Image (cartoon, helix red, strand yellow):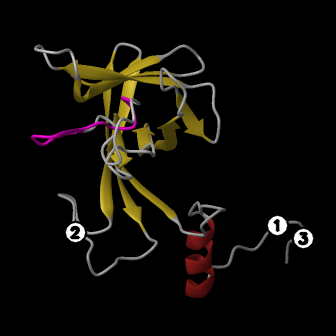
Amino acid sequence: MQIGLAQTLPVSPEAAKQNQFQNLPVNLYTGTPQITLPVYTLQEGMLAVPVALAYNASGVRSGDIASWCGLGWNTIAGGMVSRTVRGLPDEGLDDGTTHEGYFQGNFTNNLDDLESDVYTVSLHGATYKFCFDNMPGRTAHFIPESDMHIQPVVKRNPRNNALIWFSGWLLTMPDGTHYRFGN
């Protein structure tokens, strides 16, 4: 018998499975596993955009609709801005009788929107939320506060210059990197 040499034994199946779960990152706030499958990386010069599939393991509700890549799965590629409308859309509605939205801020009748929508920016696998304040000029504020700046690109009516909708977004990160969403 030789002293000082380590003896290697095969790992039991139970121990091997336990080791797999230890390698899976878990969101420390929600307790759900973060499951991401890298697919490809688009490379152009110094810009690299990873493309991946992500699974939401927090459960499936009866009304959930599957995306193109499957129920509970989502594509992560580049970025997007989405929103949850609270009251009316922030741009307002032009449905024959114009209802002013929160972003317009004139508040001339009782049907006007008195609450900002909540916007979500998804960019390179990270998610940020923001909404507009109620001060003139409607500045966007991130939740929680951040040094990022975002402003909408607005489409206006050529007849009266009224706001019709947000056609895009300009996002500036704290390091000075600019992102353009939309047209």
Q: Which amino acid does label 3 sit on?
A: Ile
Depth check: 33 or 13 in front? 33
User: Which quadrant: the C terminus?
Assistant: top left
- Tell me the element at label 1: loop
Neighbor class of circle 1 (other Cα within 10 Å; few <14, some 14-19, many 20+) is few
Q: Which amino acid does label 2 sit on?
A: Ile
Q: In this view, does 56 lie to the left or right of 141?
A: left
User: Which quadrant: the N terminus?
Assistant: bottom right
Q: Which residue is drawn at 35% across and 13% down?
A: 45
Q: Residue at x 39, y 52 (%)?
A: 86
Quadrant position of residue 163: top left
Callout 3–callout 1 Cβ contact below 8 Å: yes
53 to 55, vertically: above or below? above
**Residue 96 inside the magenta-drawn segment:** yes
Give the image location of residue 157, x and y in percent.
15, 19
Marks 2 and 1, Cα distance to the nearest angstrom?
Answer: 57 Å
Identify the residue position indicated by label 1 in the image: 5
Give the image location of residue 182, x and y in percent.
25, 27
- Tell me the element at label 2: loop
Q: Which of marks 2 and 3 is in front?
A: 2
Depth check: 164 or 144 in front? 164
Quadrant position of residue 14: bottom right
- Tell me the element at label 3: loop
Give the image location of residue 152, x and y in percent.
36, 24
Depth check: 64 or 106 in front? 106
Q: Which of marks 2 and 3 is nearer the N terminus?
A: 3
Mark sitting on residue 65: 2
Identify the residue position indicated by label 3 in the image: 3
Residue range highlighted in magenta: 93-104
